[in-house]
Image (cartoon, rainbow, N blue to C red):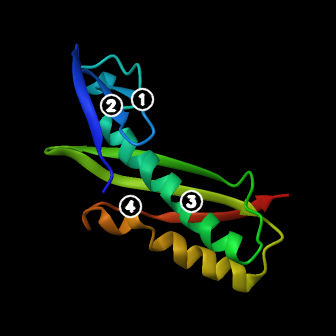
Amino acid sequence: MTKMNAIYLGDKHCKAEHEPSQCVLETDAPKDNQGRGESFSPTDLVATALGTCILTTMAIAAEKEQINLMNSKMTVEKEMSSNPRKIAKLKTIIELPNNLSLEKRKKLEEIAQNCPVKISLHPDIQIPIEFKYTLI
């Protein structure tokens, strides 16, 4: 079990701490929802969690097969619906090395599609994932 703590600082800002590491981050409401957009919003963290979970789970599998995914990248574009306000779509692009065999690509793509964050999200959220093999 991992524990996180947060405190509300006012003006729609929160300060959160990852208890095991004592790493701290702050959130703010987005500009389109009464905030100043000065930091990640809570829904931005969901999008970030998705992309970094995909990279991390692929890296765990890649290391077991001596595949180097160093400098692989992710981009997640978050789209919100307005009524009710919720995450509607997380369009995800994963950039990987172009020297991976077709077999390795297929395996990594399957791992990405089943990362813990992705399979934990509500099924109404659209989560298209595009894989680009462009990194040298």
In primary-sequence order, the first of circles 4 and 2 is 2
Q: Secondary structure at mark 4?
A: helix
* Circle 1 residue: 24
In the image, taking residue 62 as reference, residue 33 lies left or right, namely left
* Circle 4 residue: 117
Q: Amino acid at mark 1?
A: Val
In primary-sequence order, the first of circles 3 and 4 is 3
The structure residue drawn at horizontal position 31% and vertical position 37%, both measured from the top left corner, is 42
Q: Is residue 100 above or below residue 103?
A: above
Q: Position of residue 121 (x, y in %)?
A: 30, 62
In the image, taking residue 113 as reference, residue 33 lies left or right, namely left
Q: Residue furthest top?
A: 11
Q: Nearer the viewer, residue 50 or 129?
A: 50
In primary-sequence order, the first of circles 2 and 3 is 2
Measure the C-alpha gap from mark 2 to mark 1: 6 Å
* Circle 2 residue: 16
Between circles 4 and 2, the one closer to the viewer is 2
Mark linked to residue 56: 3
Q: Position of residue 77 (x, y in %)?
A: 47, 46
Q: Position of residue 57 (x, y in %)?
A: 54, 66
* Dot 4 and dot 1 residues touching (CB under 8 Å): no
Q: Amino acid at mark 3?
A: Thr
Number of labels in the image equals 4
Measure the C-alpha gap from mark 2 to mark 3: 22 Å
* Dot 4 and dot 2 residues touching (CB under 8 Å): no
Examine the image and state in which quarter residue 23 appears. Answer: top left
The structure residue drawn at horizontal position 32% and vertical position 22%, both measured from the top left corner, is 31
